[in-house]
Image: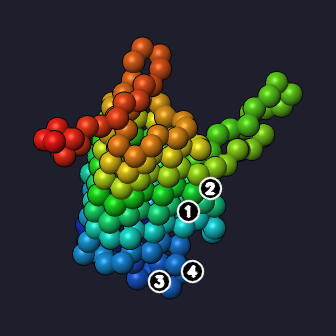
């Protein structure tokens, strides 16, 4: 069963922080002053789930961070917008200085399915999602198991990602597919 926490103010977060230090360190926070959770934010974890905030973190309303036997590591100075969620059964890692837009969904697992049994009884394929530092993920993006997004990337709104995207990629959706381009740096423009 999940332990569900809802935060409406800093006092609730402080109570959680004190509780987590005592109860097997399922959630780790470097400094509660650096973590700002919007109204109706939920941190969910089970007896094996881990959630770590490595530095400054803020999110808006209705954000869900859920670890069901997995590990979620959130770097320094990360922001998550309204209605976004991430669910881990393996590992999700988010680098420093990353911005995540509204209604973004991040999953490190897929359902196993075949025609022989009920899908709900077949379990999961579990993997890793790795999001680099200085990444901007636009609204309504879905990031699936086995995805690596390099540093300094921009993901356009509405993309569905699965695979590897190197540093400096601009990932945008075209009709029915994702396409990838390199981001031109300021130094390249001025030289």
- Name the quadrant of the N terminus: bottom right
Give percent across and percent down for residue 58. Answer: 27, 59
Which disc, if any, is residue 90? 2
The local secondary structure at tag 2 comes to loop
- Crowd around label 4: few <14 · some 14–19 · many ≥20 (10 Å): few
Camera-side residue of 38 and 57: 57
Are circles 2 and 1 on residues that touch, CB within 8 Å? yes
- Coloration mode: rainbow
Asked if 179 appears above or below 3 in the picture, the reply is above
The local secondary structure at tag 1 comes to strand
Q: Residue at x 54, y 67 (%)?
A: 50
Q: Residue at x 82, y 24 (%)?
A: 115
Residue tagged 4: 24
Q: Earlier in the sequence, mark 1 or mark 3?
A: 3
Q: Residue at x 40, y 82 (%)?
A: 18
Q: CA distance from mark 2 to mark 1?
A: 6 Å
Q: Which mark's residue is nearer the viewer, 1 or 4? A: 1
Asked if 151 appears above or below 43 in the picture, the reply is above
Residue tagged 3: 21
Give percent across and percent down for residue 55. Answer: 32, 70
């Amino acid at each position: 069963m999940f332990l569900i926490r809802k935060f409406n103010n800093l006092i609730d977060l402080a109570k959680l922080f004190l509780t987590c230090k005592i109860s097997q360190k399922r959630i780790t926070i470097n400094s509660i002053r650096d973590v700002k959770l919007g109204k109706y934010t939920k941190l969910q974890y089970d007896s094996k789930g881990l959630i770590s905030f490595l530095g400054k973190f803020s999110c808006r309303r209705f954000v869900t961070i859920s670890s069901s036997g997995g590990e979620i590591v959130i770097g320094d100075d990360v922001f998550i917008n309204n209605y976004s969620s991430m669910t881990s059964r393996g590992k999700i890692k988010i680098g420093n200085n990353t911005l995540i837009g509204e209604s973004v969904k991040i999953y490190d697992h897929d359902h196993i399915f075949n025609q022989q049994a009920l899908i709900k009884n077949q379990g999961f394929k579990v993997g890793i999602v790795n999001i680099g530092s200085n990444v901007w993920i636009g609204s309504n993006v879905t990031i699936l198991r086995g995805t690596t997004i390099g540093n300094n990337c921009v993901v356009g709104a509405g993309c569905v990602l699965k695979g590897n995207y190197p540093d400096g990629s601009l990932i945008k959706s075209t009709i029915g597919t994702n396409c990838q381009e390199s981001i031109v740096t300021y130094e390249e423009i001025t030289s």
